[in-house]
Amino acid sequence: MTSADTITLQEAASLSSRERGLVVVSTLRANGTIQSSLVNAGVLAYPATRETILALVASGPVKLANLRARPQVTATFRNGWQWAAVEGRAEIAGPDDPQPWLDAEGLRLLLRAIFTAAGGEHDDWDEYDRVMAGQRCSSAPTGFTAANGGRQYRNHAARQGNSLPRPKIVAS
């Protein structure tokens, strides 16, 4: 990463490249508490607009329910003591969340693209497709732009002594 006060989504995501794309994603529960999960996520072009976004494969009723009701999401990337977090709004696209820009074939290919963008590899893509369809997995493309309230945070240096540098808050 650069020492500048801003960070791009690509720079943030590069922190997790050694972690096979593992990212902590936090959503908001109905009662106002935070729900966090460790997921694989990757940067790719949003199919509807070609804008650069963070995308993840969402499965499980809790995360999907949270994102449907409250699409605010924070993704935190790390490598050692360096970290970056980005905030934005997710858009769910999947078998239970149809989008006009995505048909069934497009979803199948998007789920593969997210998996590979997160550093995943698979020996049998037909099996991968069957599992994703069987689990009714959805994609959660997430934009982190100023237009949708996106913000980015990061620390600037590795841990020094017992204190960590305070993160700088920047508007993207």
Image (cartoon, grey):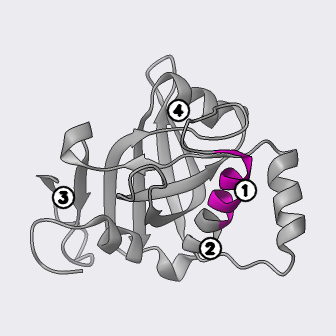
Residue 44 numbered tag: none
Vertical comparison of 75 with 78: above or below: above
Residue 167 numbered tag: 3
Q: Which residue lies furthest to the left in this view?
A: 4
Callout 2: SS: helix
Q: Residue at x 34, y 71 (%)?
A: 10
Which amino acid type is shown beneath numbered disc 1?
Answer: Arg
**Nearer the observer, disc 1 or disc 4?**
1
**Is residue 80 in view from this perspective?**
no
**Nearer the observer, disc 2 or disc 1?**
1
- In primary-sequence order, the first of circles 3 and 4 is 4
- In primary-sequence order, the first of circles 1 and 3 is 1
- In primary-sequence order, the first of circles 2 and 3 is 2
Q: Horizontally, is 81 left or right of 108 in the view?
A: left
Residue 38 point in image, percent of width and height: 58, 55
Q: Horizontally, is 75 left or right of 40 in the view?
A: left
Task: Say which residue label 2 marks.
Answer: 116
Q: Judge whether residue 105 is colored magenta.
A: yes
* Viewer-nearest residue: 80 or 53: 53
Q: Residue at x 16, y 59 (%)?
A: 166
Give the magenta range: 103-112
Disc 2/disc 1 C-alpha distance (Å): 13 Å
